[in-house]
Image (cartoon, coloured by chain):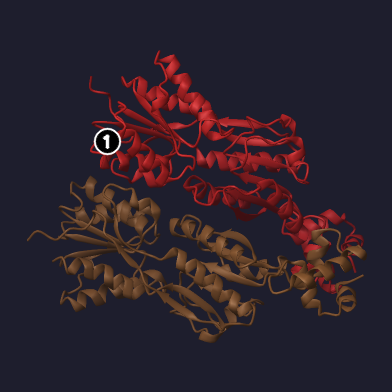
Chain colours: A red, B brown
Amino acid sequence: MTIKDIARKAGVSVSTVSRALNGHPDVSEALRKKILEIVRAEHYVPNSSARDLVLQESDTIGLIVRGIGNPFFTELIPLIEEAIVRSGYTPFVEQIATGADEIRAGAALARSKKLRGLIFLGGRFDYTEEDVAVLSVPFVCCSYTNSFGTLPETSYSSVSIDDEKTAALAVTTLTERGHKRIAVILDTMEDHSISELRYRGYLSALRDAGIEPDPALVVETNAFTMPEAYRGIRRLAASGTEFTAVFSISDSMAVAAIRALVDAGKRVPEDCSVIAIDGIPFTEYTVPVLTTLVQPTRTMAERSVSTLIGVIEGRGKHRHLLLETGLRTGGSVRPRTV
Amino acid sequence: MTIKDIARKAGVSVSTVSRALNGHPDVSEALRKKILEIVRAEHYVPNSSARDLVLQESDTIGLIVRGIGNPFFTELIPLIEEAIVRSGYTPFVEQIATGADEIRAGAALARSKKLRGLIFLGGRFDYTEEDVAVLSVPFVCCSYTNSFGTLPETSYSSVSIDDEKTAALAVTTLTERGHKRIAVILDTMEDHSISELRYRGYLSALRDAGIEPDPALVVETNAFTMPEAYRGIRRLAASGTEFTAVFSISDSMAVAAIRALVDAGKRVPEDCSVIAIDGIPFTEYTVPVLTTLVQPTRTMAERSVSTLIGVIEGRGKHRHLLLETGLRTGGSVRPRTV
């Protein structure tokens, strides 16, 4: 007795049997009951691992999270799961290390779980067609773009903020308040990834304000971690380089930067302002509350899921959404006293 | 050609062939080569998904993480992965929601990935034998105990801190500095879980110091979240109830508590001391640095993995380890000025 036999007996397609067995909401209750009766009568697929082998498709959407210590992802994961469940699919969340290969992990998961689609939360910004050829299911890049890659836009989806524009907004918030000596804290200036895009935004905001960039104000952490951000700002403060504000490309590095400024004898925001991008819940509770451009996590989760499911179900096409951030006015930025 | 045929040709057991193919360290290099030559000669298992179906076991250890927003887990995940890889096994990390059923998720993963063993990072404290009967592989509870359950000690392992003793240590740190009016912030007093154990420790430290517990000083958040911790401490501060210190059962709720105290016009630590349990990296960078009892995350990860692998390989027995915490002297606790 195979799934084909069940389908023949029920007078429906194999795909309908599969969807019925997976509790898919587009199968009517009456039809589901009929199929389940046949399944029971024929003693078909007594355990789910046998079922997994037989079915051609499941109702599962994989979420590959690359970068375990990222508090921004921590906030997005449950929102994406919720959106998947609400859409009648089943989420499966796999975590991989920051430097791991999300495409390979996604391809393996797609095979073992017979996925319908994949959401990558964090990944490289420079995919080629060859890189993603191993993926047998549609995918969406959540929270990042493929700005440095060569994938045709029609072959995948992405939902993220505009990194360059958002960074420019953050830095303009500082220049508008009279700051001219603005330090930036990032991974590396040329990482072909998030740091490079946000550094471009920093430069363009300075340019717009008529400020000459000073390489001495660029703090590269080479690691994206709080300890490295702390050390970088301590070094900058000890170097004698004058600065009245810091733009951090992430909330968590901004928290370490504030600590470093305080330890170096500078008050925040009286002596030095700090602004960032992310808006993780934690920084709503720091002293002072972090002023930051908040990523719209709920919208990002929902659009990622709805876009992917549109493609899976043949209702929609791949698309590339750039979402707006919102300024959270905390207590870490104030006008420069001239 | 099946795995049995390979085993017969090589003159070894099926299990040895499986271990050789999975790169298991207990198979000699010479024997592995011999087996691989037969495999190649016979064109056996050309792809890994066919291999997964045929092999009775893999080299994979599953890590089920229950509770996505928990920053303490975020720190433990890469440490556990590292320890698994160092031991010659392959980790597979699945994330499930805070309220989800980790045993069911573990049983499904054990089937689909042919796991050798399971590590639960976060879970219920009250398992029965019936609950865990679905698990076909050995497991270890990492960072929690089964204090409210009825599992025989010989049927599973656990590696955690002693919740009651650690809470008592934290509160004694406060009583020794002259504090008598000590608030506690927890989920609920009777959750049959971590809050209940740490609340017991709070009570016993008060008792040891000759202090009568005051129910008005218990802040129940019913959620373990920062917003609820913030609201709880704001309510307590507004109630007029006198207190000079707060014991929070987690670092993240302590951060929210400090913010609430500051917003209520109290200085930390001058007007109110705050101490917690966890020692997440984030709270090393808050202003003030959080004084907290630091969980030994690296040791916890390594012992969880080594204990489990000892059981898997038949070298060790199930055991229950209680690890010591260390006091991080931050800036959030000071002697009460009387």
Q: Look at 65% across and 71% down and name the residue there.
A: B107
The chain containing the residue under callout 1 comes to A
Q: Few, some or many C-alpha atoms within 10 Å of disc 1 (few <14, some 14-19, many ≥20)?
A: many
* Identity of the residue furthest to the left in this view: B338
Q: Is residue B219 visible?
A: no
Residue B201 or A224: which is nearer the viewer? A224
Q: Residue A308's spot in the image, x, y percent? A: 68, 41
- Image quadrant holding the C terminus of chain B, namely bottom left
Q: Is residue B141 visible?
A: yes
Amino acid type for the residue under numbered disc 1: Val
* Identity of the residue furthest to the top in this view: A210
Q: Secondary structure at mark 1?
A: loop
Examine the rendered structure and indicate whether residue A281 appears above or below residue B85.
above
Numbered circles on residues, count: 1
Examine the rendered structure and indicate whether residue B23 appears above or below residue A219.
below
In which quadrant of the rendered view does residue A248 lie? top left
Residue A192 or B275: which is nearer the viewer? A192
Examine the rendered structure and indicate whether residue B329 appears above or below residue A275.
below
- Image quadrant holding the N terminus of chain B, namely bottom right
**Pointer 1 residue:** A268
Examine the rendered structure and indicate whether residue A30 appears above or below residue A229.
below
Q: Residue B77's spot in the image, x, y percent? A: 52, 59
Q: Look at 32% across and 75% down and name the residue there.
A: B165
Residue A28 left/right relative to B122: right
Residue B84 left/right relative to A150: left
In which quadrant of the rendered view does residue A336 lie? top left
Q: Residue A98's spot in the image, x, y percent? A: 57, 48
